Amino acid sequence: MEQKKPPLTLYLAAPRGFCAGVDRAIKIVELALQKWGAPVYVRHEIVHNKYVVDSLREQGAVFVEELDECPDDRPVIFSAHGVPKSVPATAKQREMVFVDATCPLVSKVHMEAARHHAEGLQLVMIGHAGHPEVLGTMGQLPEGEVILVETVEDVACLTPRDPERLAFITQTTLSVDDTAQIVTALQARFPGIIGPAREDICYATTNRQAAVKAIAPKIDALLVIGAQNSSNSKRLVEVGRASGCAYSQLVLRADQIDWRAIDGVRNVGVTAGASAPEVLIDEVIDAFRARYDVTVEIVETAQENIEFKVPRVLRETA
Ligand code: 0CJ
Ligand code: F3S
């Protein structure tokens, strides 16, 4: 006789998973493949998810890290995270066909940076060193014009050209709470610093973090579906931990779940970073159903209906 499965409630955060920028970026690669055929080159992972990248690779996308790995005569797509100004400039010089899949909310930050620079301000960017979005945004301006700060401690060490002529911008996928502290430190040290109303963290990042905070009191363990190189996904793990969830873990997909670690737990939260497809969430739910008598509860803290158009060159194909 089959053994009775133990009961377990899965609290699904909503919103979770794909945001409008990711949706658009993936669509751009698919439409480019339709329009120009394979191979289509993609500079950097289009979004930080192995499952997404592998399935586009199967359709004929070739992922590279730098433009010099692409031939002149094939189209190239720039990832959702954005690129330094030098990248499209080089592509133009080489007369390549290129499509920029930078999320419009990242492009907005690029424009903000350019506007402040044109007004003679030096910029402070709050972000994570080495992340492609940070490289892309800092690469909008000449060297030395954007100073990176990662922590409150970094603010104390800043030596700007003119402390009275400063503006700040942020990476779009940061922790809302950690960033607020850095902004407060910046404003305390440089009272005249100009910035966006709050920060440049996008709606998707903000909403996913708020949803984790809402489920945190109900759960003993949190699983965040996402990749190790996904900034917004890693922030969700931290938010889970900061909201009192002792076990808060990033998993790429179901086969990475450490079942022993959650043995005995009866209330598990599940969310997904902005680059994780819903099929991976379904896979995780199925894995739980195989072991437990599962009740699924959706905890919805916001509704999202934002959609971004694909670039004009691909609209007819769409
Ligand atoms: O940088 C972005 C515009 C976010 C893209 C979607 O998420 P992901 O995981 O590819 O990138 P992050 O590492 O920036 O979160
Ligand atoms: Fe854009 Fe935010 Fe998604 S910046 S790609 S909407 S995580």
Image (spheres, helix red, strand yellow):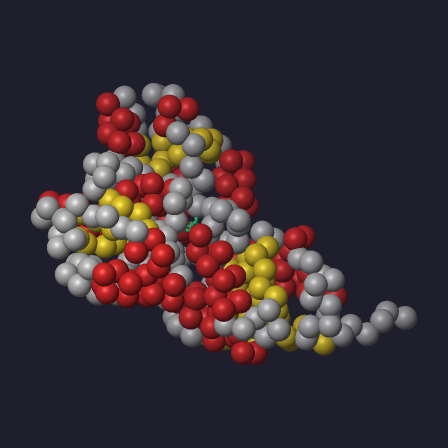
Q: Nearer the viewer, residue 66 or 96?
A: 66
Q: Nearer the viewer, residue 84 or 74?
A: 84
Q: Nearer the viewer, residue 120 or 29?
A: 120
Q: How many labels sit on residues?
A: 0
Residue 272 showing in the rendered view: yes
Q: Residue at x 25, y 54 (%)?
A: 169
In this picture, residue 292 sits left or right of residue 275: right
Q: Quadrant of the C terminus?
A: top left
Q: Residue at x 81, y 74 (%)?
A: 4
Q: Quadrant of residue 174?
A: bottom left
* Image position, residue 74 (x, y; %): 37, 25
Q: Quadrant of the N terminus?
A: bottom right
Relative height, residue 224 to residue 116 (above, below): below
Q: Residue at x 67, y 52 (%)?
A: 255
* Image position, residue 60 (x, y; %): 49, 32
Q: Quadrant of residue 281?
A: bottom right
Q: Nearer the viewer, residue 189 or 275?
A: 189
Relative height, residue 29 to residue 3 (above, below): above
